[in-house]
Amino acid sequence: MNNRHSTALAIIGACRLAEHLAAIEALGGVRLLQAAEALGDPAVRGVVVCAPLRERAHWIRQAAAAGKHVLCAFPPAATFQRLRELVDCCGAAGVELAAFAEALFSPLAAQARQALGQNLLGAPLFFELRVSLPQSWIKDTREGLLLFCGPAYFSLIHEYFGALDSVYARARSLGLNRPEEDVVVAQLRFRNGVEGSVHLNGLGGQGRVVLQIWGERAAREFAADLPLDLRPQYRDFLAAIETGRAPALSGARLLESLKWVEWFRQAARFDREVFAHEVCLG
């Protein structure tokens, strides 16, 4: 980032703190404060919430009350209804609530976006998304895989293939003695006729994401190692603060991503295909 930027950010919480600090330092030109008291500093334009899930809603509300834009670890809230309340709270305060979604800014996302945008594959027919995470990444979290890593990829899928029509999903806790799922397998059907499968696996020893897309003329595979770089998302958030536009994963797009999480949960709980008109968001 060019040194002309002098935006001040406050960071609250310790989740992945070292990665966040390294990314912000690498950008340059950003003044960082690491105390909750910084919310009252008029120079602070945005707040980065890296607190545990149970504390995020509190800090988001505090930041909104102080007139600060928010970039939060995913999920900002555990349910669609609570997330909508937070989005509305921030909207009423005239600030943006964005969530971390490094996948949206990754080379994998850009390459797939280009291939589809330039019609290199022909009309898409089928895709397969596989995300594998080390068990060590999720063993101390209270979120299952659907919340921990699903939303960014769901947002990408929605961008690429449009409105979802139905989901049939299985979600299981297999590797850890806890109720939150560490394996998710789902079949998806879209209103435009595209179909696909999603595999989220938290039993691995290495982080990896692979997206394969089959079109009428060709097929392509896009892959990346995890974790992904945080810097592009910070650039997006800082640019949004400076220009007044919405960050990438915020507002309606953020809500849609959590709607998909609820949809997958319901399909897994009912153990059947769940159609769009059946999704209950409370």
Image (cartoon, rainbow, N blue to C red):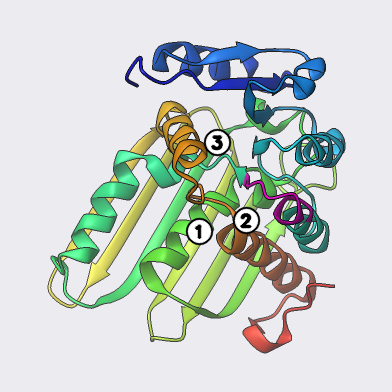
Q: Quadrant of the N terminus?
A: top left
Dot 3: few (<14), some (14–19), or many (≥20) neighbours within 10 Å?
many
> Label 2, on which residue?
184
Task: Classify 166 as above or below 22.
Answer: below
**Amino acid tagged 2:** Val
Residue 23 in the image: x percent, y percent?
47, 18
**Amino acid tagged 1:** Ser
At x 69%, y 33%, the residue is 138
Residue 198 in the image: x percent, y percent?
50, 60
Residue 207 in the image: x percent, y percent?
48, 32
> Label 1, on which residue?
155
Labels 1, 2: front one: 1
Q: Earlier in the sequence, mark 1 or mark 2?
A: 1
- Which secondary structure lies at badge 3? strand
Q: Nearer the viewer, residue 79 or 240?
A: 240
Labels 3, 1: front one: 1
The residues bearing labels 2 and 3 have C-alpha atoms spaced at a distance of 12 Å
Q: Which mark is residue 133?
A: 3
Dot 1: few (<14), some (14–19), or many (≥20) neighbours within 10 Å?
many
The residues bearing labels 3 and 1 have C-alpha atoms spaced at a distance of 19 Å
Task: Classify 26 as above or below 242.
Answer: above
